[in-house]
Amino acid sequence: WMSILKVDTINEKTSGNGVAIPGHIVAVHNARSTVNAQAINSSSLVNITGLSITITPKNANNLIVMDATIPTTNTYVTNYAFLKDGNTTVTSLASTSGIANVQLIQYMPEVTNSETSQCMQVSLQHFETAGNTNSRTYTVACNSYWGSAYNMYVNNRSGGDMPGFSTFRVMEIAQ
C-alpha cells in the first residue's frame, strides 16, 4: 500500500527561521561576472567584478556552501579566496609570500612572471557554518603575486579574443 500526502500550504514555525529539513537546500544565490576582461596586478586580494552575493542565513547552524569558476590567464603564483565582508573565510592556512588564508594557490613553474596569452579555468569550493543570522556579503577575490605583482586577466586574455564569464554560487543547507 502506498499513501499520498497532499498539502496546499506548509506554515513555518513561529521562530521565523523557515521550514528546515536537515540536508535540504534552503536557498541558492548565483552571480555571474560578464565584464570583458578585468586586469589584476596586485599583491593584495582584489574582488572579481560581479562576483558578490549578499545573504541573510535562515539559521545559525545552517551550512553555507560556496563554489566559483573563473577563466583567467596564468602568472607564476596566483591566489584565490572567498571573502566574507572583506575578510578571508579560512584562517588556518599559512602565508604564501605574504598572502594568508586563501582557498587555492595556483603555481605555474614554467611561467616566470605573466603569461597573458593563455586562459585556464580555475574552480574553487568552500563551506562554513553560518554561525549567526546576520546579513553578510560573500565575494570572490584573487591576486597575482610572488615577490612582486604581475599582470593577469579574469574573463579574457590580454589579446581580448577569448571572452568568458566567471560564476559564483552560494547555497544555504539546513542542518
Image (cartoon, helix red, strand yellow):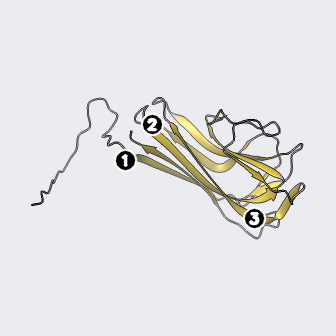
Q: In the drawing, what numbered circle is on residue 119?
A: 3
Q: Horizontal and vertical percent for residue 95? A: 76, 36
Type of the residue with mark 3 = Cys
86 or 101, which lies in front?
Answer: 101
Type of the residue with mark 2 = Pro
Disc 2: CA contacts within 10 A as few (<14), some (14-19) or many (>=20): many
Q: Earlier in the sequence, mark 3 or mark 1?
A: 1
Which of discs 3 and 1 lies nearer the camera? The answer is 1
Which of discs 1 and 2 lies nearer the camera? The answer is 1
Structural distance between the alpha carbons of marks 3 and 1: 36 Å
Tell me: 112 left or right of 141: right
Name the residue located 69 percent from the left edge and 49 percent from the top edge.
Answer: 48
Q: Is residue 132 above or below residue 166?
A: above
Name the residue located 12 percent from the left edge and 60 percent from the top edge.
Answer: 2
Secondary structure beneath label 1: loop
Type of the residue with mark 1 = His
Tell me: 112 left or right of 9: right
Q: In the drawing, what numbered circle is on residue 57?
A: 2
Determine the image quadrant of residue 33: bottom right
Quick check: marks 1 and 2 in contact, CB under 8 Å? no
Secondary structure beneath label 3: strand
19 or 163, which lies in front?
Answer: 19
- Where's the C terminus, which quadrant? top left
Secondary structure beneath label 2: loop
Q: In the drawing, what numbered circle is on residue 24?
A: 1
Residue 74 visible (yes or no): yes
Q: Earlier in the sequence, mark 2 or mark 3?
A: 2
143 or 95, which lies in front?
Answer: 95
